[in-house]
Image (cartoon, rainbow, N blue to C red):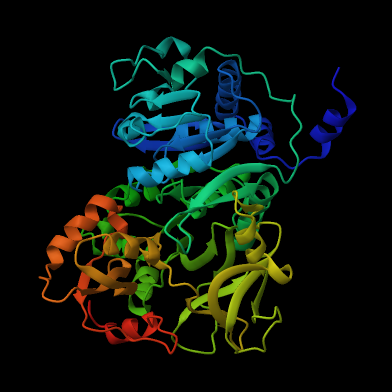
Amino acid sequence: MKNQSLEQNLIERVAMGDMLRRRSRGAGNRSAIVGFNELGRHEISYRELNNKSNQLVHGLREQGLVQGDSLALLATNSIEFFIVLFACYKAGIVLVPINFLQSPADIEYNLQIAKVKAIVCESRFTPLTASAKLEHIKLRILITSNNATNCDNNKDNNHDDAGENTSNSSLNLNQLIAAQHDSEIEDIIINDRDTAQIIFSSGTTSKAKGIETSHLSLYMSSLNTPLSLEFGKFHNHLAVLPTFHCASLSFCLSTLQTGGKLCLIPAFDPLSVAKIIKDEQVLSTGLLPIMWKAMLAHPELPTFDFSSLTIGLYAMALIDGETLQKLRDTFSSCKFHLGSGQSEYTPCATIFYDGSATEFAQGNYWGVPTAISDQAIIDEQGNEVPQGQQGEICWRGPQVMSRYLDDEESSREASKFGWHHTGDLGLIDSEGQLLFVDRKKDMIKSGGENVASMKVEQVLLSLPNIVQVAVFGLPHEQWSEAVCAGVQVTPNSDFNESDIIAQCKKKLAGFEVPKRVLLLNEFPLTSTGKIQKNALREQYKKLFS
């Protein structure tokens, strides 16, 4: 017989694994996820997804994992990603989605500071973890390329995948699942603010911060997003951006909360996106501005019926007015909204709705707070500033992170004065719309990824003959912001831009490598000797025009 505290917890708790159990009972036969990959279209119902997640929990426990352990997941957008995700939520295991676009050194750092006990990894990503020195790893589980064909519950189809890049030390995910029973997980206490996952986000230093997000934050986000964006019951959504990213994952969980159909594609391709929207009757999708532009440029786009699409989301950057109008003309039944937030505040925190009135015709508008968020502009003393005055963008609400992993000082700094501090500067105009002004600590957003300027600077300073450097972002049509570097070299040294960029490629992820390296004889400095990056951005703002 269950003890009373467990019984009470099961009755009243807010836990992400419970969400899937509820959907499996209320919408069990409905399509939960449709995944597309090189092998075709694969579908799983809510009941099947719930059962397989339960089976995986039993398999993980059999291999020695317990509540509170951390599990890293390196996978593209796939059904398997969500089987693993919900298994972790159900078992009280902390999920650590890994950005596989990072360099191997950064991935190893993520795995180390999260103290992961297990890695679940697609076979294509095994080289990224094979050389990692991780003494605390107990378990390696491999997702092989044909797992998607086994997403029904026909266990007779399971076969030995050992020939597909497996190693003797790795278990096969499908086989681990198939060997277990699917009984529901109701034997552990999960508290609302227990950590459900750790998301890594590039901070203002060269090392990424681990962001602990609770079950409550994720659950509230999964309710808030449908409410704020008017997702109806059984909402169909197409996820194109990688699900290791907090924004993409947030929209996926919101879709599953409604009992809708989540369509997944592992990489962006305009023709594939158009076809899936038409064939699956997709109601919403989220793309980077560069992706929306690629859609418009595809010659076959006019041949598709997009009448189902009602919500087009974009993030990371603005869409210019001309492109936005072309999108409205092409997707005539669709509204285009900008969603903003950050990993520390489970997206979305604020939305700029299509057609909103603003005080200024131009500007990087982030819009109004979502249904359960407070939004304010705060000065250095913690006071709200008058309308139209610049200060730090701050939010508060149940979607906020619990803390930075093993970083009490940064955690305290982010939650001063009873507000979550974003580190971004902005103002609220006379229409109540948030206008983003600048990044407080010079974070660069390039191609949808955060780039810490200090990290790039440290790599550049490690190269021969470079004595001073400043890394900053410049407007770029394709990347939104292009990473650029100004360097000063030692006297009588040769400057070779191509060689410097080549050296950076050896030490940085692709999105972190400078697009241009500029030779500077001197830097604009403050009275205290600090480089004025805002002056450099202004001086070179038309470099990519």
Which residue is the extreme one toward the right? 4
Say above or below: 415 vs 357: above
Q: Nearer the viewer, residue 453 or 282?
A: 453
Say above or below: 537 vs 165: below
Q: Position of residue 86 (x, y in %)?
A: 58, 34
For this view, does 38 lie left or right of residue 111? Answer: left
Q: Position of residue 354 (x, y in %)?
A: 50, 73
User: Is residue 447 something that shows in the picture?
Assistant: no
For this view, does 156 lie left or right of residue 481? Answer: right
| Residue that appears at 64% across and 88% down | 387
Quarter of the figure with residue 423: bottom right
Say above or below: 130 vs 381: above
Q: Position of residue 355 (x, y in %)?
A: 51, 77
Q: Nearer the viewer, residue 345 or 320?
A: 345
Q: Position of residue 265 (x, y in %)?
A: 37, 43
Which residue is the extreme one toward the front? 491
Quarter of the figure with residue 545: bottom left
Say above or below: 231 vs 14: below
Which residue is the extreme one toward the top? 156
Figure disc tally: 0
Quarter of the figure with residue 88: top right
| Residue that appears at 34% across and 50% down | 273
Q: Nearer the viewer, residue 180 or 136?
A: 136
Q: Quadrant of the N terminus?
A: top right
| Residue that appears at 23% across and 60% down | 463
User: Is residue 321 something that shows in the picture?
Assistant: yes
Q: Nearer the viewer, residue 400 or 50?
A: 400
